[in-house]
Amino acid sequence: MTGTFDPAAYDAVVYDLDGTLVHLAVDWNAVAADVIDVYAEHAVKPPGSDLWELLGAADEYGLAEAVEEAIAAHEREGARRSTRLPLADLLEGPSESESPSESESPSESGRESGTEGPPVAVCSLNCEAACRIALETHDLASGVDAVVGRDTVSTWKPDPEPLLAAIDALGVDPARTVFIGDSERDAITAERAGVPFISAHDARGE
């Protein structure tokens, strides 16, 4: 059950991925350790132990590509072994999706015409490939119109750019869109973007 949240009350819905629609099978401590190893391999002292701090500093040391791939490799595998969460029931659509047209941007997917409800996007701190793998793994891709991951645009949450990019891909008004996520980072992102926010916990009616 998904509680009393009604997607039809909005012109569009944007969901976070990990912790909201699915749970990625990722050991984030192991990811951070692998990223620290990347720094060590390049004889660079890590600026800290926090994963996102390490990612944010990587470009300064010329390590952005290597660090991004170290994180993304874990995320892609974690997406394949991910667990579906109850809110994902709201994304169920046709079993097969249409292929994107040549005019669509790389972040757009092929949700079939006739799918009920407002347009849907995913905006995640995980890499775009992991998002797509998770959606395909749980037969959710046909219910999603756009995907914006950490590497889709030049910034990541809590910067508002990724959320606004997802909304722009749907062609709707941010003020008439709702963002659903499970973290304080998601709430801050929505506030900065001027987008209504509902926690995944509240959307589930818990």
Image (spheres, rainbow, N blue to C red):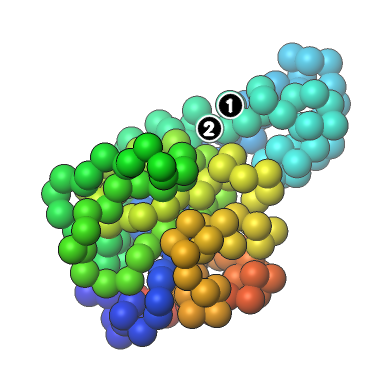
Q: Which of 110 and 183 is in front in this view?
A: 110
Q: Nearer the viewer, residue 87 or 165?
A: 165
Q: In this view, does 93 lie above or below 43?
A: below
Residue 145 figure quarter: bottom left
Badge 2: few (under 14), some or many (20 or more) residues near its Cα, within 10 Å? Answer: many
Is residue 184 something one can see in this rendering? Answer: no
Q: Where is residue 132 in the image (x, y as percent from the top left)?
A: 38, 41
Residues under labels 2 and 1: Cα distance? 5 Å
Q: Do the residues labelled 2 and 1 touch (CB within 8 Å)?
A: yes
Q: Residue at x 79, y 15 (%)?
A: 42
Q: Which of 144 and 39 is in front in this view?
A: 144
In this rendering, position of residue 73 left or right of residue 54: left
Badge 1: few (under 14), some or many (20 or more) residues near its Cα, within 10 Å? Answer: few
**Residue type, label 2:** Ala
Q: Say which element carries label 2.
A: helix
Q: Where is residue 128 in the image (x, y as percent from the top left)?
A: 48, 41
Q: Which residue is label 1 attached to?
A: 69
Q: Which mark is residue 72?
A: 2
Q: How many numbered circles does the render carry?
A: 2
In this rendering, position of residue 195 left or right of residue 24: right
Q: Residue at x 65, y 57 (%)?
A: 161
**Residue type, label 1:** Glu
Q: Position of residue 1 (x, y in %)?
A: 22, 74
In this rendering, position of residue 62 left or right of residue 30: right
Is residue 120 something one can see in this rendering? Answer: yes
Q: In this view, does 174 lie above or below 91?
A: below
